[in-house]
Amino acid sequence: MKTTRRNALSALSAISGWAALGLPLQANAQVPEPVFGTPGKDSGWIPTPNGMVEAMLEMALVTPADLVCDLGSGDGRIPLLAAKRYGARGLGIEYNGDLVKYSDSVAQKEGLADRVKFLQGDIFATDFTQATVVTLFMPPDFNRKIRPMLLAMKPGTRVVAFNFGMDDWQPDDSVYVDAQRGMLWRVPAAVGGDWRLAFDQAAFQKVAQPTLLHIEQKFQKVTGHVVLGGERLVLWDLRYDVDRLRFAVIHQGQRLDFDGRVSGTGLEGSMVAGGQPVSHWKAARSA
């Protein structure tokens, strides 16, 4: 797990209201200002500190190519900042209608209504699967309940949460602002299970086909073994990042390095023996 500290952002979090984010302090005279603790379905509204908002979006490496979805968007500050400062598209899902109206009015006033949308509704009944970045500041029970939906999203989707984690799904990165923690997870592809491994025989004749690759996965952590020529070999120097799987085995006194990615419903990559590329390999799930 990587940890980042951004002391330069600490001063921002000490400034209350929208001014620190370069957004208006009041959206519209006809729209009431949000009230701390305004009730929703899953939690009352408590805003994420301004400095943390910026730090989390920076940690997620938000770009104009992203759709940033805030679950329980409150006054809309996260999707609005994602659009205003980083050029992203924004989506807010909020149960409280007054907060949605307020957020809409800010988007209109800032000229961001074409890039940021706010939906009133139940998070668990609203489709946000197209998001590339998901942000949330919700209590632990909510996080445990939403976690399966997040893990089912496209591999590489970034999930950013303030203050409360995802139980035993450990974050990939963290940022601290005024001793408060923001966390980042990257949704991993599902690679756990048994795979039938096949090589390009023209380039690599030493291993009988087909062979077995077994992977045990817990979120972004994986272990496993391969069976080559009837020999069970533990995977070592094992690295797994979103959809890229790299590992090495020692077979007949020679080091074999595998480097592959999830490709559709299978795995595919290259193998190096003794520092020289020798084979292309593919793997399909074993029936």
Image (cartoon, rainbow, N blue to C red):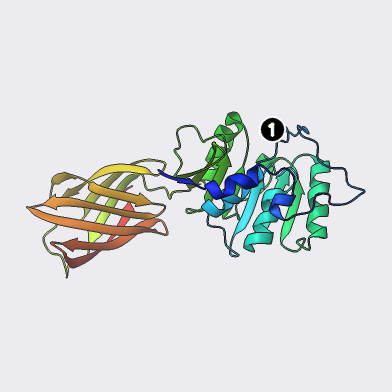
Farthest top residue in view: 141
Counting the numbered discs, the total is 1
Q: Give percent across and percent down for residue 169.
A: 45, 37
Tell me the kind of residue under disc 1.
Answer: Asp
Farthest right residue in view: 30
Q: Is residue 139 above or below residue 123?
A: above
Answer with left or right where residue 188 lies relative to residue 92.
left
Quarter containing the N terminus? top left
Front position in the image: 4 or 94: 4
Q: Give percent across and percent down for residue 16.
A: 72, 42
Q: Give percent across and percent down for residue 51.
A: 62, 46
Front position in the image: 154 or 206: 154
Q: Is residue 65 above or below residue 5?
A: below
In this rendering, does residue 153 appear at all? no
Q: Give percent across and percent down for residue 89.
A: 66, 60
Q: Is residue 164 above or below residue 117?
A: above
Count neighbours of disc 1 (C-alpha within 10 A) and say few if under 14, some if 14 to 19, many if 20 or more.
some
**Could you tell me which residue is drawn at 69 percent across and 32 percent down?**
42
Q: Quadrant of residue 106?
A: bottom right
In this rendering, does residue 233 appear at all? yes
Answer with left or right where residue 14 lies relative to residue 100.
left
**Could you tell me which residue is drawn at 57 percent across and 39 percent down?**
178
Front position in the image: 6 or 121: 6
**Could you tell me which residue is drawn at 21 percent across and 55 percent down?**
210
Farthest bottom residue in view: 202
Element class at badge 1: loop
Q: Which residue in the protein does label 1 denote?
A: 42
